[in-house]
Image: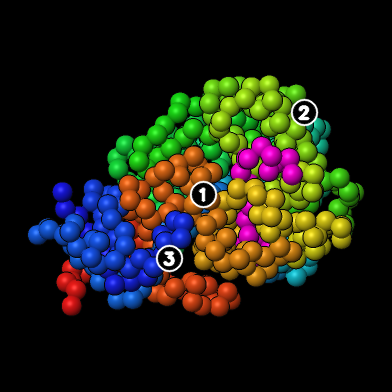
């Protein structure tokens, strides 16, 4: 057997052990068959082998975003109004008015991305402001965190929400301001016409192709419901997924009251579903994560919200745990973390299994919680980019004594917690792993070393997905998923990481971003 493709004359950073000096690798049938130098790959060259001269460029394992809402990234690149970066309510209302003018009367206007800390007025959009901007179309504008939503009167009318409506468990309605918090979202969402499978497939493809251009070869979509799962499976069956996707299947949907049964497991080269997802609280940037001390500078006293009673959460997790599903739980505030860590401990104590669950975000762990998570060996999935894009929100809302522990990445590593980095896009604008690495190394209360950031954005995600034997490093037998950069990240300053350019992204040895150039060495 000969190689289909040989890459040579570059800096090949395998991120495996102490192998720091490779310059070439050979690929056959989508997997790596040799890594090293020219003399080690030359025996794999045959008449049909494509030779690709890297011309000194750098090769890394393909990036892995361990928590990104892929289809929602696609929404904002297609037909949902993108409000990220809008810096005033005046401009926001103008954008809504402009979009409403393109819609038929009565059609829903969906947008996402506003952040009161970015708006110069420092406040949320209001019901009356949205009424003026869009009197004939129902409007639902999701905050950047996706835990708070602004609506107009038409949306409330269509949804049948009146002043007598009671806030659901784990949520809150502020009808005067037109704000919908946490699970109360379901009261509005139920009135929006159901998305079609074609809608979902289009959003997935828009998102995945964009991510591939950033060097991402694997990603975890962390809140998938039955229609979205069906769309992913359909695309996989048609061979259309451009990157490898891992799914966290939602048990109790955000904004819904029903509980979904455990999904049928799926495992193909491009689609994997053997994990489930729970939301335990809200978000820090919008002051809805469940915390032990009151937030500052909020319009009313708040310590956030818990989504579950502990016994209900345990019962639902137990069902998944005993069925062999990996569990990923959104847990940010210290109160939510205490609830979830305690439930995880009980699962492992009463029903020991080797599977390692996940804590999505892991925003405000205390020392005791860090130690208990380390002891269990479960994964933390934080977002380094949060401090860069949402730091103003943290400083605005969090008590001073919480700041040092807020997304402190170094604390996690020092406690030997396995960490997988991610972006949580489109909660943030910048989903590039290079931007995430730069943020991990330069901002926040616990910056990390570059090597730790590289591993957390490659091997970390692979391990958290339970698939480190196939991806995460450039080793013989693993998928040939790799990214080619114009320069070596080890040879530039930490503040220059975002200046690196992704030249090519290979998935299974195939590059659909750049070109394979057949050349022979001199």
How crowded pointer 2 is (Cα within 10 Å; few <14, some 14-19, many 20+) is rated as: few
Which of the marked residues, 2 or 3, is nearer the chain's N terminus?
A: 3
Q: Which mark is residue 360?
A: none
In the visual, does 424 lie left or right of 16? right
Mark nearest the camera among 1 and 3 is 3
Residue at (30, 43) in percent of width and height? 239
Taking the image as drawn, is residue 129 in sight? Answer: no
Which of the marked residues, 1 or 3, is nearer the chain's N terminus?
A: 3
How crowded pointer 3 is (Cα within 10 Å; few <14, some 14-19, many 20+) is rated as: few
Q: What are the residue bounds of the magenta stretch?
A: 371-389
Which of the marked residues, 2 or 1, is nearer the chain's N terminus?
A: 2
As drawn, the residue found furthest toward the left would be 47
Residue 340 at x, y percent in the picture: 72, 35
- Disc 2 and disc 1: Cα gap in Å? 30 Å
Location of residue 413 by image quarter: bottom right
Mark nearest the camera among 2 and 3 is 3
Residue at (73, 40) in percent of width and height? 372
Residue 315 at x, y percent in the picture: 68, 22
Residue under label 2: 309
Q: Is residue 279 above or below residue 417?
A: above
Of 96 and 436, nearer the camera is 436
Q: Is residue 53 above or below residue 79?
A: below
Labels 2 & 3 near each other (Cβ < 8 A): no
- Callout 1 secondary element: helix
- Disc 2 and disc 3: Cα gap in Å? 49 Å
Location of residue 384 by image quarter: bottom right
Residue under label 3: 20
Q: Which mark is residue 461?
A: 1
Taking the image as drawn, is residue 23 in sight? Answer: yes
- Disc 1 and disc 3: Cα gap in Å? 21 Å
Residue 106 at x, y percent in the picture: 57, 45
How crowded pointer 1 is (Cα within 10 Å; few <14, some 14-19, many 20+) is rated as: many
């Amino acid at each position: 057997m000969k190689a289909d493709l040989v890459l040579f004359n570059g800096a090949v950073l395998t991120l495996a052990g102490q192998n720091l000096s490779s310059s070439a690798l050979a690929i056959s049938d989508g997997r790596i068959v040799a890594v090293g130098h020219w003399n080690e790959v030359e025996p794999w060259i045959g008449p049909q082998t494509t030779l690709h001269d890297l011309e000194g460029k750098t090769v890394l394992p393909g990036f892995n975003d361990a928590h990104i809402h892929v289809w929602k990234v696609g929404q904002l690149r297609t037909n949902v109004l993108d409000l990220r970066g809008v810096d005033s309510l005046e401009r926001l209302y103008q954008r809504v008015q402009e979009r409403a003018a393109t819609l038929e009367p009565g059609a829903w206007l969906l947008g996402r991305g506003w952040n009161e800390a970015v708006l110069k007025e420092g406040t949320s959009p209001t019901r009356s402001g949205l009424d003026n901007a869009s009197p004939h179309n129902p409007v639902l504008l999701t905050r950047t965190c996706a835990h708070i939503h602004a609506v107009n009167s038409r949306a409330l009318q269509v949804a049948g929400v009146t002043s007598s409506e009671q806030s659901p468990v784990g949520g809150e309605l502020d009808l005067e301001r037109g704000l919908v918090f946490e699970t109360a979202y379901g009261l509005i969402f139920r009135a929006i016409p159901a998305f079609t499978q074609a809608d979902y497939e289009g959003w997935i493809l828009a998102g995945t192709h964009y991510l591939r251009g950033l060097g991402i070869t694997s990603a975890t979509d962390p809140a998938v419901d039955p229609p979205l799962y069906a769309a992913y499976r359909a695309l996989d069956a048609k061979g259309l997924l451009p990157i490898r996707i891992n799914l966290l299947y939602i048990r109790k949907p955000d904004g819904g009251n029903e509980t979904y049964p455990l999904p049928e497991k799926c495992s193909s080269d491009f689609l994997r579903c053997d994990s489930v997802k729970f939301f335990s609280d809200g978000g820090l940037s919008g002051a809805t994560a469940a915390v032990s001390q009151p937030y500052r500078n909020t319009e009313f006293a708040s310590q956030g919200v818990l989504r579950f009673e502990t016994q209900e959460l345990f019962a639902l997790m137990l069902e998944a745990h005993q069925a062999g599903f990996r569990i990923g739980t959104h847990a940010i505030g210290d109160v939510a973390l205490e609830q979830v860590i305690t439930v995880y401990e009980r699962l492992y104590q009463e029903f020991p299994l080797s599977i390692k669950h996940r804590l999505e975000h892991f925003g405000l762990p205390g020392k005791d919680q860090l130690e208990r998570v380390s002891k269990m060996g479960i994964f933390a999935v934080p977002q380094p980019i949060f401090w860069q894009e949402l730091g103003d929100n943290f400083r605005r809302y969090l008590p001073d004594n919480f700041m040092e522990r807020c997304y402190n990445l170094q604390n996690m590593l020092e406690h030997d917690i396995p960490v997988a980095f991610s972006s949580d896009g489109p909660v943030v604008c910048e989903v590039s792993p290079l931007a995430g690495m730069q943020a991990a190394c330069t901002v926040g209360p616990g910056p990390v070393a570059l090597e730790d950031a590289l591993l957390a954005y490659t091997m970390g995600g692979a391990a958290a997905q339970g698939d480190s034997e196939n991806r995460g490093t450039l080793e013989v037998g693993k998928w040939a998923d790799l990214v080619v950069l114009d320069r070596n990240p080890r040879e530039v300053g930490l503040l220059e990481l975002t200046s690196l350019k992704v030249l090519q992204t290979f998935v299974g040895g195939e590059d659909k971003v750049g070109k394979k150039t057949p050349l022979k060495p001199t």
